Every structure is written in C-alpha cells, then in structure tokens.
Image: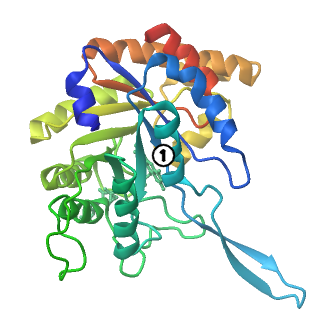
Amino acid sequence: MKITEHLSNAKKTLFSFEILPPLKGENIDNLYNHIDPLMEFNPPFIDVTYHREEFVYKKRENGLLEKKSIRKRPGTVGICAAIKNKYNVDTVPHIICGGFNKEETENALIDLNFLGIDNVLLLQGDAIKTESVFVAENGGHKYASDLLGQVVDMNKGKYLDEDLLNANPTDFCIGVAGYPEKHFAAPNLKTDMKYLKMKVDMGADYIVTQMFFDNKKYFEFVKKCREMGINVPIIPGLKPLTTKRQLNVLPRIFYIDLPEELADAVEKCKDDKQVRQVGIEWTIKQSKELVKFGVPVLHYYSMGKSNSVLNIAKELF
Ligand SMILES: Cc1cc2nc3c(=O)[nH]c(=O)nc-3n(C[C@H](O)[C@H](O)[C@H](O)COP(=O)(O)OP(=O)(O)OC[C@H]3O[C@@H](n4cnc5c(N)ncnc54)[C@H](O)[C@@H]3O)c2cc1C
C-alpha cells in the first residue's frame, strides 16, 4: 500500500522508523531482533536506507597502493523484500542518484515493482567519503529531482528504451527529503525550498524531514511550505540522542542545531546510559508536541538500535 494511502486512512498519528541494512557479513537475524519489539506499535511502513560504495587503498606486495571499492552495507532491496515478507508491512527503499546510471536505476525500479514494493524515497545520496562534493555517475542523475523525473516517467509507462511499446506503467508513491534547517549545500533556506517545491510540483507525494531537535524549526518549515503551495504531507524525522559524542557529531554530519537546553542536559550526564535517558525524554517531549500539532506520522531514525525508540513508542503509541 502507498504511504499516502496509509496516511489518509489513519485515525491518529502513526508510528514508523528507519533502519540501516546490516554491515556486510552480518546476519539478518540481528536486524529482525531490532525490528521484532517495534512491531507491537503497528508501523505501517519501515524505511531502509541505501549506502554507497567507499574507496579504500590497500598496500600490495610490490608496495604500490591499490584502490578498492567496498560496499559496507549492501542489500537495501533484499532487506525491503525480506521485511515485507516476514512482517507483512510496507517498506520504503531509499533510492539514490550517486553511483548509478539511469539504466541501473531503471533495472532496480523494475525489481522493486516485481517485488510489490509500492513506495520509494528518492535522494541525491551522500557524497563518497573521499570526495568533498557529490559527483554524479556518468549517465546518472545529479539531483533528486532528476531521479524523480525518471520515476514519474516510469509511472506513466515511459521507460528509457523509446522503442518499448505498451510498457506497463509502475505506480510508485514517491517520497523526497526536506530540510527544516536547510540542506548544507544550499545558499539559503529559500533557495533550498524552491527546489523542494520543484520536486513536489514534479510529482513527489510526500516529504520526510531531516532530523531536528527543536520543534519550532519543523513548525516554521511546514508554515513556509504551505505558504509556497507545498501541500503534501510532511513527515517529521526524529532521532533520540544516545551518546555524548553525538553533541558534536550530529551537527557536523547533518548540519543541524541542538537546542541549548538539550546540550546542557547531555553535558551533565556522567555516562552514555544517562545520555540515552535524556535522549528518550527529549524525544518523547518533542513527539507529544508534534502529535498535538497533528503530524500524520512520527518517523524515528533508529540507526539499528531499538531500545530508545522502543521506550519512546511505549509512551506514545
Ligand atoms: C529523510 C532522509 C533520508 C536519507 N536517506 C539517505 C540514504 O538512504 N542514503 C544516502 O546516501 N543519503 C541519505 N540521505 C542524505 C541525502 O542523500 C543528502 O542529504 C544529500 O546531500 C541531499 O539529498 P536530497 O535528496 O535532499 O538532494 P537534492 O534534492 O538533490 O538537493 C541537493 C542540493 O542541491 C540543491 N538542488 C536541488 N535540486 C537542484 C537543482 N535542480 N538545481 C540546483 N540545485 C538543486 C538543493 O537545494 C540542495 O542543496 C537522507 C536524507 C534525509 C533527509
């Protein structure tokens, strides 16, 4: 079922979460152990992230360095199908521009369609760690909007091969990312939102936000979206803090601010166990306020650790 159908059928705020595919070599049972306790709260869908290759240099016997491409977390499509099969829940694979040409993207979308996966979250994708800026693949897409154009075409039965006659149209429900605190590469929020509006005008059905720790940022973002004529559902993404280190790491990686009150509370913690408790309480407070605001879904970035999200879900759902 499409995310938009889940949302319009919902009688109250729904619960959903995002997981990462296991590291290469890990057993999928670890992931199931993480998902199992969260199923009690009836998530209508689970997002599965996509992770690009990384390049590492290995020293050969002759002393020369060899550049090797490594995919640490493959398996997004397989995991989506496995979860859908095991739990009878919808899954949302994240599809990225980086690392794929259009042909490969089309083939992946055909696989997803055959597997009965109705939703995709379309993203530019993170730059490779060894590249300072995102570089599009030869024959691939640069922006999420370009990728969206391809999916919208397929939803109209238009595939890359122009000679293909009477091709079956796909029917993907399309999600895109939005940034209440601006995407790091955008010169300002207004410009960033102009491109967000472009994605919605082109056919995106809903938006999922980057994590934020101050609800005011989300409320202002939604207000601005509505003023600009962005009228699709805007799903808030929330992440419970779990370590003191994240005070510095999250702002650096995700270009977000942590409110003073939260940062002070975390600073006072003696260990990460205490930080986890602060993170849970903060996210519960955020969640309750967002429910009052009338958000359609609370979407949690669980990062493969269910404990905090489980405690939050117990309070709310
Ligand atoms: C909810 C969520 C889930 C994510 N999941 C993943 C994941 O699974 N895997 C992963 O690798 N990354 C993931 N990311 C990270 C994401 O890939 C990065 O934030 C990336 O840098 C931007 O992606 P985007 O789709 O928002 O990009 P875009 O919409 O392409 O925007 C990128 C930048 O370009 C600008 N821009 C957009 N369109 C145009 C245009 N036509 N012309 C000029 N400028 C333009 C925007 O303002 C922005 O600054 C996720 C992010 C979010 C918020």
Q: Nearer the viewer, residue 42 or 210?
A: 42
Picture quarter containing residue 271?
top right
Where does the image place residue 259, in percent across and percent down from the top left? 47, 26
Where does the image place residue 242, in percent across and percent down from the top left? 64, 27
Taking the spot 28% from the left edge, 51% from the top edge, the residue there is: 188
Under mark 1, the amino acid is Cys
Count of numbered circles in the view? 1
- The answer to whether 168 is drawn above or below residue 20 in the figure is below
Determine if residue 309 is in view: yes
Where does the image place residue 181, in percent across and percent down from the top left? 36, 40
Task: Say which quadrant the C terminus sits in.
Answer: top left
Taking the spot 13% from the left edge, 34% from the top edge, the residue there is: 226
Q: Nearer the viewer, residue 23 or 27?
A: 27
Task: Say which quadrant the N terminus sits in.
Answer: top left
For disc 1, the marked residue is: 80
Give the class, few, some or many, for how many residues have Cα within 10 Å of label 1's Cα (few <14, many ≥20): many
Residue lying at the far bottom in this picture: please name it: 62
Taking the spot 65% from the left edge, 58% from the top edge, the residue there is: 72
Determine if residue 268 is in view: no
Q: Is residue 90 left or right of residue 85?
A: left
Where does the image place residue 195, in percent across and percent down from the top left? 22, 55
Ligand 1 resides in the quarter of the picture at bottom left
Q: Is residue 208 left or right of residue 261?
A: left
Q: Nearer the viewer, residue 248 or 166?
A: 166
Name the secondary structure under disc 1: helix
